[in-house]
């Protein structure tokens, strides 16, 4: 009796199963000139050891003939489970989404009774093998990696005539580095995105072997060959290496720090003070003193919204307003607030300088486009990303 069948991936490495129209699964036994001999996929199982056999004639490769009967019921549930796993493997091999996201998407469209049988820990190693199978061997020395990047077959051109088109003239450049998601023997992945008409376009990815000042100088000397705008607007965080090199290599640029990073640093510093942290987000946040401390923190964050020439005076007024009530607070709170004001003055006013963190009347106040990219990038790539994953992204 002839039966139609479909081929599905097995959970075994580099093997396939045959699923016939009667919902039974077969495994390839041997191949001859006459055709392919199949045995029940349960034959090797100790608890079943089914002896059913089938044959795919060479002249009808899309049909099979069952030669003996099974001693068990159809394999419908097991087959649907394998089909779902096979779909996951196909998506992992062809898409750039993370393994977990692929798993969640496939499970969402799988019947609940089948989905309960497929847990992520059980399929994770299988999906890892699929990813590794489709990648060439990673280059080991940096010199070999550089040679690999010059191969025409791995290069993709997304836009031609960038410098002639005026695409990046008078625009804003968002710069940031990620240290957690980076191929081996590199220290960080430094990225530059171009803000063009409200959309962020990736302009440059740089794999850096060092975070030293000299490395940033060499990077920005190359960046000047890409950015031909005489006075670009640059937004970044407050890493001292980037701040000094931008002012040195892009002297005509308008360099603005990220307001989000400014606010985050202020809150983090206050949270590190044991008597203040509880007043901000701990068990003491319901006290009247808590409202005062939180108001001081918010007013200090808002300093970046003032014109540059009013920021220092604004800090003095915030500090003076707090000291009017300081006598009502404990000595510990007073000392830690003094530490906070000293930090803002010595680090942000004297070292970073107001013109770098001022966002007064700026259309883009934060580097959140880069932060969003880094978040998405980190979910897609692995913490220690391979070279070929970077190319795939």
Image (cartoon, rainbow, N blue to C red):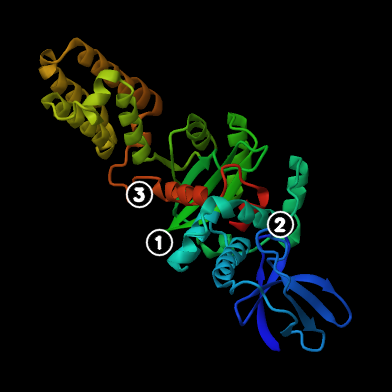
Instruction: Please give the label number shown on residue 321.
Output: none
Instruction: Please give the label number shown on residue 364.
Output: 3
Query: In which quarter of the view is residue 136 placed?
Result: bottom right
- Quadrant where the C terminus sits is bottom right
| Residue drawn at the location 65% of the way across and 59% of the way down | 47
Query: Between residues 334 and 306, which one lies in front from this camera angle?
Result: 334
Residue 146: x and y in percent read 74, 47
Asked if disc 3 and disc 1 are in contact, CB closer than 8 Å, the reply is no
Residue 188: x and y in percent read 58, 39
- Quadrant where the N terminus sits is bottom right
Local secondary structure at mark 2 = helix
First in sequence, mark 3 or 1: give its number.
Answer: 1
Question: In the figure, is residue 342 to the left or right of 293?
Answer: right
Q: Is residue 238 above or below residue 351?
A: below
Residue 387: x and y in percent read 67, 49
Mark closer to the observer (1, 2):
2
Q: Is residue 180 above or below residue 201?
A: above
Question: In the figure, is residue 25 to the left or right of 302?
Answer: right
Query: Between residues 376 and 145, which one lies in front from this camera angle?
Result: 376
| Residue drawn at the location 55% of the way across and 55% of the way down | 99
Query: In which quarter of the view is residue 266 placed?
Result: top left
Mark closer to the observer (2, 3):
2
Residue density around tag 3, few if under 14, some if 14–19, many if 20 or more, within 10 Å: some
Local secondary structure at mark 3 = loop
Question: In the figure, is residue 355 to the left or right of 9?
Answer: left
| Mark 2 to mark 3 CA distance (whole Å) | 43 Å
Q: Which residue is mark 1?
A: 197
| Mark 1 to mark 2 CA distance (whole Å) | 40 Å
| Residue drawn at the location 47% of the way across and 52% of the way down | 376
Q: Which residue is mark 2?
A: 133
């Amino acid at each position: 009796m002839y039966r139609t069948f479909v081929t599905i991936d097995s959970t075994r490495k580099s093997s396939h199963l045959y699923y016939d129209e009667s919902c039974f699964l077969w495994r390839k036994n041997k191949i001859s000139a006459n055709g392919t001999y199949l045995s029940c996929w349960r034959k090797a199982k100790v608890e079943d050891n089914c002896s059913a056999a089938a044959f795919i004639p060479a002249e009808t490769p899309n049909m099979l003939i069952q030669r003996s009967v099974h001693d068990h019921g159809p394999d419908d549930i097991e087959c649907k489970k394998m089909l779902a796993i096979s779909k996951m493997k196909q998506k992992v091999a062809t898409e750039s989404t993370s393994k977990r996201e692929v798993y969640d998407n496939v499970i969402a469209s799988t019947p609940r009774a089948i989905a309960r049988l497929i847990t992520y820990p059980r399929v994770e190693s299988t999906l890892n093998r699929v990813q590794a199978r489709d990648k060439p061997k990673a280059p080991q020395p940096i010199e070999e990696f550089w040679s690999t990047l010059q191969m025409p077959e791995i290069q993709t051109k997304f836009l031609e005539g960038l410098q002639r088109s005026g695409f990046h003239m008078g625009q804003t450049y968002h710069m940031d580095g990620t240290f957690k998601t980076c191929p081996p023997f590199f220290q960080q992945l430094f990225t530059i995105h171009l803000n063009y008409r409200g959309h962020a376009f990736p302009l440059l990815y740089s794999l850096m072997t060092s975070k030293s000042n000299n490395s940033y100088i060499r990077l920005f000397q190359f960046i000047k060959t890409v950015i031909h705008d005489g006075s670009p607007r640059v937004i970044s965080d407050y890493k001292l290496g980037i701040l000094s090199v931008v002012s040195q290599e892009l002297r005509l640029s308008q360099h603005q720090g990220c307001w989000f990073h400014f606010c985050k640093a202020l809150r983090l510093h206050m949270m590190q003070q044991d008597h203040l942290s509880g007043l901000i987000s701990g068990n003491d946040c319901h006290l009247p003193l808590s409202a005062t401390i939180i108001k001081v923190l918010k007013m200090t964050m808002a300093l970046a919204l003032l014109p540059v020439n009013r920021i220092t005076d604004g800090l003095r007024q915030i500090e003076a307003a707090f000291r009017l009530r300081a006598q009502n607070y404990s000595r510990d709170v007073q000392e830690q607030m003094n530490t906070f004001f000293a930090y803002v003055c010595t680090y942000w006013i004297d070292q970073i300088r107001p013109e770098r963190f001022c966002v007064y009347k700026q259309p883009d106040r934060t580097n959140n486009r880069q932060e969003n990219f880094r978040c998405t990038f980190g979910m897609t790539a692995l913490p220690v990303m391979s070279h070929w994953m970077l190319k795939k992204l």
